[in-house]
Amino acid sequence: MPKKISDKVQFLKPSGIREFFDLVIGMDDVISLGVGEPDFPTPWNIIESAIYSFESGYTSYTSNKGLFELRAEISKNIKKRYGIYYDPETEILITVGVSEASDLAMRALLNKGDEVIIHEPCYVAYEPLITLSDGKTVIIKTSAENGFKLPAEDIRNSLSRKTKGMLLNYPCNPTGASYTKKELIAISNELKGRDIVIITDEIYGDLTYDFEHTPLFTLPGMKEKTLYLNGFSKAYAMTGWRIGYACGPEWLISAMNKIHQYTMLCAPITGQIASIEALKRSYNSVLEMKNEYRRRRNLFIEGLNEIGIKAHMPEGAFYSFASISKTGMDSKTFAKKLLHSEKVAVVPGTAFGSGYDGFIRMCYATNTDKLKEALLRIGRFVKKHAG
Ligand SMILES: Cc1ncc(COP(=O)(O)O)c(C=O)c1O
């Protein structure tokens, strides 16, 4: 029977994160720095709005594109923050997380063999989504030496006649790398005048610590060619509510909605109502959580460097992509041994791209006591295994 599975799916690699976390299930006293999830509950006013929506009988489908009130609120919010207008009727689509939005984008854009540029290490879903849409990934490797930032000139060398799009994620999962406005202008200069779509996954945009986050669409000439993806999972601690959105040119949003209406129908109404509350009244909670993540980042990165794990300072998101080269172990061996001997779960660097065997990803969105204990345990482990 397995033969009945399509070749595309049969040959799809399992996620390096999930594969590893099957090992964690059933173990006690594990400190997990694995899954990329806020440890805060969703702010209470957002939860309350959902409870009230149930009490008021809001349990139905919504329009395919999502509740108009939510699209209008997203449009208003973007206009207020960045001075750019997206028409809520035609240029905004509510999706089941940024996950669905990126899948829709690939399926709406790609024909067989079309190329999409991605930068590695990157979020685990990009390559599989491109492959499932019959596209081809063109990979730009980034390195610790330049803070895992995408060198603008590498974009030029990666473009070809077949390039349909480029996926840019900043702040980046797994590295925390992001771009100042000046750095982003250098990137946009490479993209201007090119007939391609840039899909920006800015889900961690509100979790940028040291400078203002600049969405790519705000730069001159970029709005027309950018598909901006964002959602509520990370900044609002709403991973389980499954609400994301895409803002972009009408032709692309309408093509994505064509697929969405058959596959998803609409995003869950409760999450959409909660997201309206999130946008209307919860930005202070985002700022409070961000300040706490910043404190945790400072403590954790300093601690890692003290115990000999070389870690650069992430500019956003809540991950450290740190070097374990000192131990001489490959990242899977390191992660497995660390888990079994010290009960700390981390993700091997290879889950995010080939060639990152000397790295592990750790999520620091966990409380300070646990972070300190994790540092003690990792320190003990490294001391024992340092070459
Ligand atoms: C870069 C990036 N994009 C998208 C997602 C998925 O987000 P959502 O919960 O909105 O589907 C994640 C989740 O970890 C992520 O790290």
Image: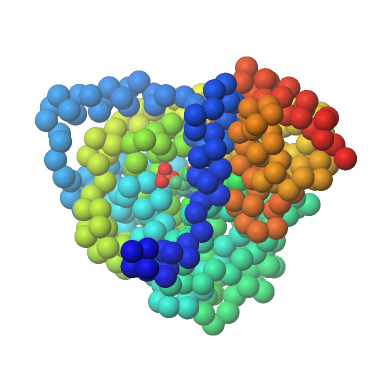
Direction from residue 70 to residue 143 in the image, left or right: right
Picture quadrant where residue 48 is located = top left
Q: Is residue 35 above or below residue 256?
A: above
Picture coordinates of residue 137, whole percent (x, y) = 54, 68
Question: In the orientation shown, which residue stands out farthest toward the front?
Answer: 1
Picture quadrant where residue 43 is located = top left
Q: Is residue 252 at least partly visible in the picture? A: no
Q: Is residue 220 above or below residue 267?
A: below
User: In front here: 382 or 257?
Assistant: 382
Q: Is residue 148 at least partly visible in the picture? A: yes
Picture coordinates of residue 379, whole percent (x, y) = 77, 27
Question: In the orientation shown, which residue stands out farthest toward the top?
Answer: 369
Q: Is residue 351 above or below residue 237?
A: below
User: In front here: 219 or 67?
Assistant: 67
Picture coordinates of residue 155, whole percent (x, y) = 63, 68
Q: Residue at x 36, y 53 (%)?
A: 100
Q: Residue at x 40, y 36 (%)?
A: 239
Q: Residue at x 15, y 34 (%)?
A: 58
Direction from residue 140 to residue 226 in the image, left or right: left
Picture coordinates of residue 331, whole percent (x, y) = 70, 46
Q: Residue at x 55, y 49 (%)?
A: 16
Picture quadrant where residue 150 is located = bottom right
User: In front here: 170 or 377?
Assistant: 377
User: In front here: 61 or 12?
Assistant: 12
Q: Is residue 277 above or below residue 331?
A: above
Q: Which quadrant is home to the C terminus?
A: top right
